[in-house]
Amino acid sequence: MASIQNITVLGATGSIGQNTLDVIRRHPDKYRAFALTASRSVEQMLADIAEFQPRYAVMADAQAAQQLNTQLPTDCTTEILSGDEALAMVASHDDVDQVMAAIVGAAGLLPSLAAAQSGKRVLLANKESLVMAGPLFMQAVEQGNAELLPIDSEHNAIFQSMPESYSGELSAHGIDKILLTASGGPFRGKSRDELTAVTPEQAVAHPNWSMGAKISVDSATLMNKGLELIEACFLFHCAPEQVQVVVHPQSVIHSMVQYCDGSVIAQLGQPDMRTPIAYGMAWPERIDAGVKSLDLFEIAQLDFMPPDEASFPCLRLAKEAFAAGGTMPAVLNAANEVAVDAFLRQELSFIAIPDLIEQVMKRHAVQHIEQLQTVLDADRWARDCAQQLMTEESL
Ligand code: NDP
Ligand code: MG
């Protein structure tokens, strides 16, 4: 990596976005923020434009873009754009080397795909795009000759624990299975009864990680692990039976790979996303990520247990969605987004989240996905269906 790498940060104002900017900040000789994107966070975007002076800033929301434009200092050279086409443009621009895909939810699909199709190094945090359109996404990576580097800490750990030559078949490399670790979230150990009255505030208070609201709720329901299981199957070309979820409350081991000779290779580290982000940006080299090293004596103990699928049915639902295939994972994802949003607005209880998703999945007739439009239609259908079910108060 001789020249300075131009990076587009999709979702720059979010948790992953800000961590990415911190790694860029530490290495001005290696990386430059080429474009930053957000939805509505004008204040944060103003501060980031002042510091990083990107060529483009894109606000998905047109009003927010207008607001940003009026507040920009007159000597600022950053061009302000808005809308889906602008997001895709900065993700695929000829001058861009790397794209951090860190928009939350289904909104990340189109720009992440644009980055893959145009052959960028894609730093994939937005797991929802793989869940929704895994086969199309992986095809775009191949056809676009893109480099796909997983940023999700577990998948980054798996990537680090696999042979460098990994070609897409576990058994060809003597790998028996992938051990996908899960913290268990803030409600680990609680029964379904104890979960009836939990609040959004409690749900987003993750014991180990500081993250955006949506993924924090996903961690609390274990849907995050379900989405990650699907993500692992697409990224590493394996079957769900080859991925075992292991609850590990300390979040020190970020995942492991088990080999046929009895070896288990793990990646350990602080629960700090700057480690996988810096790894993805610098791969195959390593750079300082601003993360303090592990103190094993302070940690002292590591625990492991199986997931509780009775209290947390979302993991089972994700496995069922993946087994059904086609449009079902996109439906699972969309219903989950609607349910989590309603829970955060206190319009749906925590335990109704899996119930709503299951009801939507039951009503869906699976279709093969050969075209993106089929995925987008299924996403729309699932959102409408979930909204309808909530207004009928059948939950
Ligand atoms: P945040 O909610 O903190 O940030 C989301 C970002 O996406 C913000 O920049 C937000 O802009 C932008 N955004 C939201 N809605 C839209 C939209 N409709 N169109 C365009 N941009 C939008 O999320 P996180 O950073 O926590 O997560 C981002 C992704 O990374 C998710 O897919 C998550 O699953 C994944 N991930 C996150 C981890 C973490 O530690 N946080 C770990 C592993 C994966 P604005 O600020 O204007 O709303
Ligand atoms: Mg993760």
Image: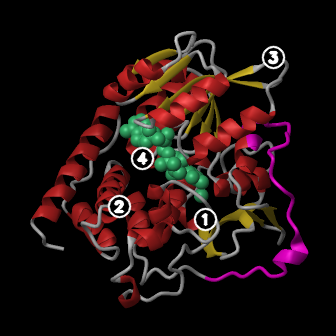
Residue 136 within the magenta-colored segment of the rendering: no
Q: Position of residue 1 (x, y in %)?
A: 83, 23
Q: Quadrant of ligand 2?
A: bottom right
Residue at x 28% of width, y 68% of height? 358
Residue at x 61% of width, y 24% of height? 50
Q: Is residue 183 depicted above or below 125 in this figure?
A: below
Q: Position of residue 250 (x, y in %)?
A: 70, 74
Q: Are marks 2 and 4 in contact (CB under 8 Å)?
A: no
Dot 3 crowding, Cα within 10 Å, few <14, some 14–19, many 20+: few
Pick whichever of labels 4 and 1 is earlier in the sequence: 4
Pick whichever of labels 3 and 4 is earlier in the sequence: 3
Q: Amino acid at mark 4?
A: Gly
Residue 293 within the magenta-colored segment of the rendering: yes
Q: Position of residue 228 (x, y in %)?
A: 54, 58
Residue at x 34% of width, y 54% of height? 337
| Secondary structure at numbered mark 2 | helix
Q: Amino acid at mark 1?
A: Gln
**Residue linked to disc 1:** 242
> Which label lies toward us, 3 or 1?
3
**Residue linked to disc 2:** 340
Q: Calculate the distance from the C-alpha at mark 3 to the C-alpha at mark 1.
A: 40 Å
**Residue linked to disc 3:** 3
**Residue linked to disc 4:** 105
Q: Is residue 191 left or right of residue 172?
A: left
| Secondary structure at numbered mark 4 | helix
Q: Is most of the magenta stretch helix, strand or loop? A: loop
Q: Is residue 354 depicted above or below 122 in this figure?
A: below
Q: Calculate the distance from the C-alpha at mark 2 to the C-alpha at mark 3.
A: 42 Å
